[in-house]
Structures are given as structure tokens and as C-alpha cells.
Amino acid sequence: MRKISENTSWIIAILTIMATFIILFIALYSNSVTVKVNQLNIRTGPSVTYSVKATVKQGAQLQVISRKNNWIKVIYKHKTIGWVASWLVTNGHIKDVTRLSEATIVLDPGHGGSDSGALSTTGQEEKTYTLIFAKLVAKKLRSKGAKVVMTRDTDKTVSLYQRPQLAASSSANAFISFHFDSSDEINTASGFTCYYYHSGDSKLLAQSVNQKMANLPLTNRGTEFGNYLVIRDNAVPAILIEGGYINTDRDFKKIQSPSYQEKYADDVVSGLQTYFKTHN
């Protein structure tokens, strides 16, 4: 009887160990993700600003440890621990990951809701066009894999203070506010300007975007210091673009033009690509 009891104890112990391993195995792989992009960077921290620790190919299995700021902490091949951009892992539409596609960018269509912004000579409201331009830039950025956060995507009122706060809470890597200028007298000014408040990364971002906008069919007024709350009280690299004078008929004709809108959006995206490639 004693021998049978000992054998039974051993069997129970072995079964318990096996069950534990099975449970651990199921738990491990049920909390895993399969990489669908061609190559995915594993970084040392949850942002594109951290260094690359390893690169994994399409089809790789990653075990999830935790999540933070839209990034996932993972284990690869049971030895490499690091962070990957959650929005890229299963994005089969992105062929290759770039620094831009790993970035989180806040786009801020100026004004909105009860705040119409400036008016054209025909009474068209600035808020309408800031939203059109920001949505177009957002679409192009998302097609390249970037994480885009909008301060507003409808005609609603958003306080000035909420806009930079959203950039901070989103752990954004860049913030762009869209506006259109207005002169004291109609039809007396023309052109676009990229404003920054903080020197360093914000100034570099303004220069990168402005250089790419140089071929737009309006006067390039360059980059300038601008004391605007949404870029002044911002903890991330932030710029404000005045995309033309809305109360100058020549400028407004361009602002309304789909071809100008497309070229403008392409240039902003190209400027962001340059910025993340060379300055981050």
C-alpha cells in the first residue's frame, strides 16, 4: 500500500508540474503578437527617441510584458526585452518601418466651434480650412504608418490650453498647429510662415518643414519666433504654420485650391520625414 501511495504521489506531482507548464505556455502565447511589417524596431524605451536594440522580421512572435504610451514592452526569442510601437506591429499595409512611422504626432487645426478665426474677404472662416488641411496631413501621415492625434477632428471648440496638454498626455514627438494669417487691411500681405517658440528641436522642426514648403506658389516668409500659447506652453517640439493670408484674395484662392492643399500636405509630411531622419 505504501508503494502504491508513493507512486500515486509521484504521478500527482508530475501531472501538477506538467499542468503548470501548460498553463504558463498558454498564458505566454495568448499574450503575444505576430509582427506583420517587414521589419520592426525593438527600442530601449517607449518612444522613437530611444535607441534601437534589435530588429525583427515579418512573422516574428513577440511576447507582451506591458504597455505604455501606445508602445508595447516585449520579449523576443526569450532573451531580448524592449519596446515596439503598438500601432505598427500588426499593420500589414506598411512595407518598411521608418522613424516617421514610429513617431506620434499631434495635429492642431486652429480655432473651431465658437471661434471662427480670421475671415476671407467673402466671409469664409479660417476654422474651416485649418481642419481641411490638418485632416489631409493626418491622412498622409497615417498612410506612412505614423501615429496621429488630432486636437479636434470636427467643428468644435477646444481651449488653447487643452491643445499642448494633449501633446504631453499623448507622449507626442511633434506638434503642428495649422492657421491662416490675416492682415489689418485686406489684400495687403501674402505668403506662409513657420513659427517656433523654443529654440532647439522646435526651431529645427520649423526649418525642416519650411524648407520643404519652399516650392509652394506663395511667398515663403521663412521661419520666425512666435509667442503663441499652443507652441510656447508645449513640452514637445512644436510649430505653428500660417499657410497663407486668408484675407488676401490671391492667397485665399490658393488656400481653396485642392492642388495647393495636396502640395502643402505633402510638403509638411516631407518636412517631418526630414526632421525625424536628421534631428532625432
Image: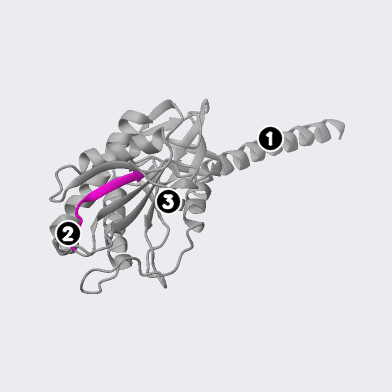
Q: Give the range drawn in magenta.
A: 187-195
The percent coordinates of residue 60 (x first, y second) are 40, 35
Mark 2 residue element: helix
Q: Is residue 33 magenta?
A: no
Q: What numbered label is drawn on residue 228?
A: 3
Q: Does the magenta stretch include residue 190?
A: yes
The percent coordinates of residue 192 (x first, y second) are 23, 50
The three-letter code of the residue at mark 1 reads Ile
User: Going by the picture, which residue comes out furthest to the right?
Assistant: 2
Screen quadrant of the C terminus: top left
Quarter residue 9 falls in:
top right
Q: Can residue 131 be seen in this view?
A: yes
The percent coordinates of residue 98 (x first, y second) are 32, 36
Screen quadrant of the N terminus: top right
* Crowd around label 1: few <14 · some 14–19 · many ≥20 (10 Å): few
The three-letter code of the residue at mark 2 reads Asp
Please report whichever mark, 3 or 1, sits nearer to the chain's N-terminal start. Answer: 1
Q: Is residue 58 visible?
A: no
Q: Is residue 204 above or below residue 258?
A: above
Is the C-beta separation of discs 3 and 1 under 8 Å?
A: no
Give the mark toward the camera: 3 or 1.
3
* Crowd around label 3: few <14 · some 14–19 · many ≥20 (10 Å): some
Q: Is residue 199 above or below residue 233?
A: above
Please report whichever mark, 3 or 2, sits nearer to the chain's N-terminal start. Answer: 3
Look at 46% across and 37% down and name the residue there: 47
* Residue holding disc 1: 17
* Residue holding disc 2: 251
Q: Is residue 149 above or below residue 67?
A: below
Look at 29% across and 70% down and name the residue there: 125
The percent coordinates of residue 173 (x first, y second) are 42, 41
